Image: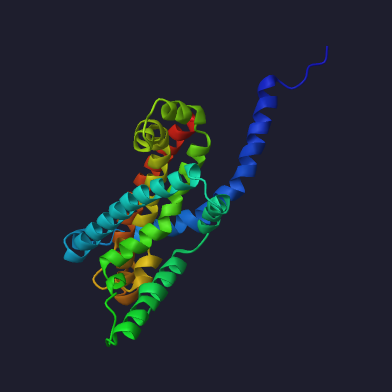
Amino acid sequence: MAGGPPPSASVSRPRLSARLWALPPVLALGVVFLYPLALVVQESLAPGAYAGVFASDAFREALATTVWLAVGATAGCLVLGFVLALVIAFVPFPGGRAVAKFIDVFLSFPSFLITLALLFLYGTVGIANGLWTDVTGAAEGPFRFLATPWGVLLAEVTYFTPFVMRPLLAAFSQLDTAQLEVASALGARPARIVRQVILPEALPALAAGGSLVLVMCLNEFGIVLFTGAKGVTTLPMLVYGKAILESDYPAACVVAVVNIAISVGLYALYRVVSRRVGAQR
């Protein structure tokens, strides 16, 4: 009886072939991403670079500003996104479906576009200040908050809120409406229905959307740059200033490494939360 190749050989060949096919994309990833990242880490290891950056007031202030802006914007997005998603999902109004679809389109907009729109509305020479000067005859308008940290916070909340609304709308679409009908039939007021029926079902989506927004706010550069907010320096802005304006590349790489480490940690948290949301669904 003729013998064929041993089973171990037939199994190992597909595995070897799969590894060979995976080699080109792995090499491309290494050249395009891992090698530049390794250069950044290597540059950050210059003697005294970490000690000098960590001891500087500029770094501590940028870190604190980055954290409070990211946390504040995330909190604002969670509250505003939850309210708007409730209205779209449970309050019938003309054009509701179109608004829900527009949210998907809004997610593709660049952040500087929203900031530019806010500048047209509330900038120093924007529409609001123009109307004020036309009506009152004053030399200048009172709306100058866009050049402050609160302006950056408003722009980030405006831009990132749809990133919270999208998973919420998906969660609301799977909610059993019979629960709402039973609660309403038993005399529960809308606020109680939201608190005891809708909110528990929305918590996983809120956690997933909030963790994603937190990661993106931590790395946001365009909004801070386009608002022109004075005295608002985040970690990405500090990297830009150290590298481009001061040509202090070791310090810029140290700040970049810190920013990457925080971002990767938060992204890992986002992945954990997303997996739990998927498992619950």
Counting labels gives 0
Most extreme residue toward the right, as rendered?
1
Which image quadrant: the N terminus? top right
Q: Where is residue 16 in the image (x, y as percent from the top left)?
A: 64, 35
Quarter occupied by residue 73: bottom left
Q: Residue at x 36, y 76 (%)?
A: 128
Question: Going by the image, does 109 lie left or right of 235?
Answer: right
Quarter occupied by residue 187: top left
Question: Going by the image, does 57 lie left or right of 180?
Answer: left
The answer to whether any part of residue 184 appears in the image is: yes
Q: Is residue 201 above or below residue 258?
A: above
Q: In this view, does 57 lie above or below 182?
A: below
- Comparing 117 with 68, the one in front is 117
Q: Residue at x 35, y 85 (%)?
A: 134
The answer to whether any part of residue 176 appears in the image is: no
Q: Position of residue 40 (x, y in %)?
A: 37, 60
Question: Going by the image, does 181 lie left or right of 134?
Answer: right
Q: Position of residue 37 (x, y in %)?
A: 42, 57
Q: Residue at x 55, y 48 (%)?
A: 26
Q: Where is residue 253 in the image (x, y as percent from the top left)?
A: 33, 62
Q: Residue at x 35, y 46 (%)?
A: 266
* Colour basis: rainbow
Question: Going by the image, does 165 lie left or right of 138?
Answer: right
